[in-house]
Image (spheres, rainbow, N blue to C red):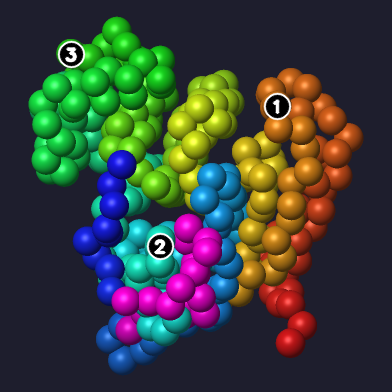
Amino acid sequence: MTTAPTGAGTAGTSTALLDVRGLRKVYQGRGRSVEAVRDLTFAVEAGELVCIVGPSGAGKTTLLRCVAGLLGCTSGEVVLEGERVTGPPRGMAVVFQEYGRSLFPWMTVRQNVERPLKEKRVPKAERRRLVDEALEAVGLAKVHDAHPWQLSGGMQQRVAIARAVAYEPHILLMDEPFAAVDAQTRADLEDLVRSLWKRLGVTVLFVTHDIDESVYLGQRVIVLSNSPTVVLEEVPIDLPDERDQLTTRAEPRFAELRTRIYKLVQRAKDGHRPAG
Ligand code: ADP
C-alpha cells in the first residue's frame, strides 16, 4: 500500500479518508471569470462507495479534477488521509471515461497495467504478482499480451480498472467510466466495481450523470446542484448490500430512491438551490 501522498501539504486533523471542505473553483478566462463550483463540502469514510450525481454542466468534472490534484481550487481544500492535496496524491488512482485515450496503444495489456507500478518503483516480482492478480480480478487473465486496440471498449475499460487496482490505491476515483460502452457491458462493469470494492476494501468515489447507476452502485449518493455547484442533498442508499442487476433494480425501494434522486436532479436543472 502507498503511504505519504506526494502532492500534499499540511492540513488539520480529520477522521474521514477524504474531506472536501468549502471547495470553490472560479475559472479565469480572457477578461471574464466563470464560477463553476461555489461551495462543496462532503466527506468520504474509508471503505465507502460514494456516488456523485448531477446534471450535465453541474461541475462534476471540475470537482473530480480538484480532488485528483489535477486542478487547483480557488478556495477551500481537499484533504486526503489528513494531508492537503496540492498535486496528484500517491494514494489515489483515477479511471476516466475515455479509456481509448488513457491506455498506451503501443504497449500490451500487461505493460499498461505494470507501468504505474514501475513508476512507483515496485520490485519486479511484486509487480508481476500485482498485475496477474488485477487482470484476473477483472476477468482478463488470458489477454496479457494483447494490445488495447485488439480489445472491445468494455475490455479496454477493464484494463484501465485493472491498472488502477494493481496500484493498490487507498481511494479510487471514477469519472463517468462507463458512459461510452453499451448497456450490457455497462451492467457487467458496474457489477465488477461492486465486487472489486467488496473484495479489495478500496474506497470508491464514483462520478456519474446516470441516476440508476448511482443508486445501483452507491452506499450514498451526493446530488449536486447545477453550476455554480453546491451539494443539494446526500441520499443514503438503504438497499441490501448484495445487489444484482435483475433483483435490485426490480425492488420497490430501488424505484423510490431513483425517483427521489431524479426529482432532485430535475430541480437542479431548473435552477433549484438549497435554502440558506
Ligand atoms: P460536468 O462535468 O458536471 O458536466 P463541468 O465541471 O465540466 O461539469 O463544468 C461546470 C461548469 O464550469 C460549466 O458551466 C462549464 O461551462 C464550466 N467550465 C468547465 N471547464 C471550464 C474552463 N476550463 N473554463 C471556463 N469554464 C469552464
Horizontal side, residue 216 vs residue 126: left or right: right
Q: Quadrant of the N terminus?
A: top left
Q: Secondary structure at mark 2?
A: strand
Sequence-earlier tag: 3 or 1: 3
Q: Residue at x 74, y 87 (%)?
A: 276
Q: Is 62 included in the stretch rendered in magenta?
A: no
Left or right of 82 on screen, residue 100 = left
Q: Quadrant of residue 25?
A: bottom left
Bin the neighbour count of mark 2 within 10 Å (Cα to Cα): few under 14, some 14-19, many 20 and up: many
As helix, strand or loop, the secondary structure at mark 3 comes to loop
**Circle 2 residue:** 80
* Front in this rendered view, residue 149 or 18: 18
- Residue identified by numbered label 3: 145
* Kind of residue indicated by mark 3: Asp
Q: Quadrant of residue 238?
A: top right
Instruction: Report the residue that reaches farthest toward the top.
Output: 142
- Disc 2 marks which amino acid? Leu
Q: Which residues are magenta?
A: 10-28
Where residue 137 sits: x, y (%)? 41, 20
- Disc 1 from disc 2: Cα separation: 29 Å
Q: In the image, what residue occupies the spot 52% across and 64% down?
A: 15
Q: At label 1, which amino acid type do we have?
A: Glu
